[in-house]
Structure formats: structure tokens, C-alpha cells
Amino acid sequence: MMHAVLEELRETSGLIIGLILALVIMGLIGYALTNVHESIVSPVVQFIKKMVSRK
């Protein structure tokens, strides 16, 4: 009986840990993408706007 409960707990905690890891990874990716957006996309957009306004 106890063994089955422990198995269940281990599976559940595994799922919970997996979810937490997924959330953390998604958060890190989102954070990284925001930084990339700031450092790469903004200058590119400004450059394109300059090129367009020059015409």
C-alpha cells in the first residue's frame, strides 16, 4: 500500500517539477527574446525607417 502511494507521489512530483522547469525555461526564453528584441530589432527597425524616409 505504502509503496503505491510513494510511486504516485514520485510521479506527481515529477510532473510538478517538469511544469516548474518548463515555466522557468519559458520565462528565460521570453526574457532573452525581449533583450534580443531591444538590442537587434529596434536598431534594424530604425534603419529600415531611415531607408524608407530617404526615398
Image: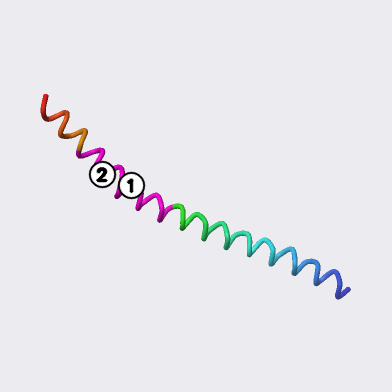
Q: Residue 37 carries which label?
A: 1
Identify which amino acid the numbered label 2 is placed on: Ser
Q: How is the image coloured?
A: rainbow
Q: Where in the figure is residue 9, as x and y percent of width and height? A: 75, 69
Q: Residue furthest bottom?
A: 2
- What is the quadrant of the N terminus in the image? bottom right
Disc 2 element: helix
At label 2, counting other C-alpha atoms closer than 10 Å, the crowd grade (few under 14, some 14-19, many 20 or more) is few
Label 1 is placed on what type of residue? His
Magenta stretch?
30-46
Q: Is residue 39 above or below residue 46?
A: below
Residue 18: give x, y in percent of width and height.
Answer: 63, 59
Which residue is the extreme one toward the right? 1
Residue on which the image places disc 2 = 42
Left or right: residue 33 compared with residue 54: right
By secondary structure, the bulk of the magenta-drawn segment is best described as helix
Left or right for 24, reference 54: right
Q: Is residue 21 left or right of 13 when viewed as pictured?
A: left
Q: Which label was assigned to residue 50? A: none
Q: In this view, does 25 lie to the left or right of 30?
A: right
Residue extending furthest top? 55
Magenta stretch: residue 33 in it?
yes
Look at the image and tell me in which quarter the C terminus lies: top left
Q: Is 39 included in the stretch rendered in magenta?
A: yes
Q: Is residue 39 above or below residue 1?
A: above
Res. 6 image quadrant? bottom right
Q: Residue at x 85, y 69 (%)?
A: 4
**Mark 1 and mark 2 residues within 8 Å of each other at the beta carbon:** yes
On screen, 31 above or below 6?
A: above
| Distance between mark 1 and mark 2 Cα atoms | 7 Å
Which is more toward the observer, 54 or 1? 54
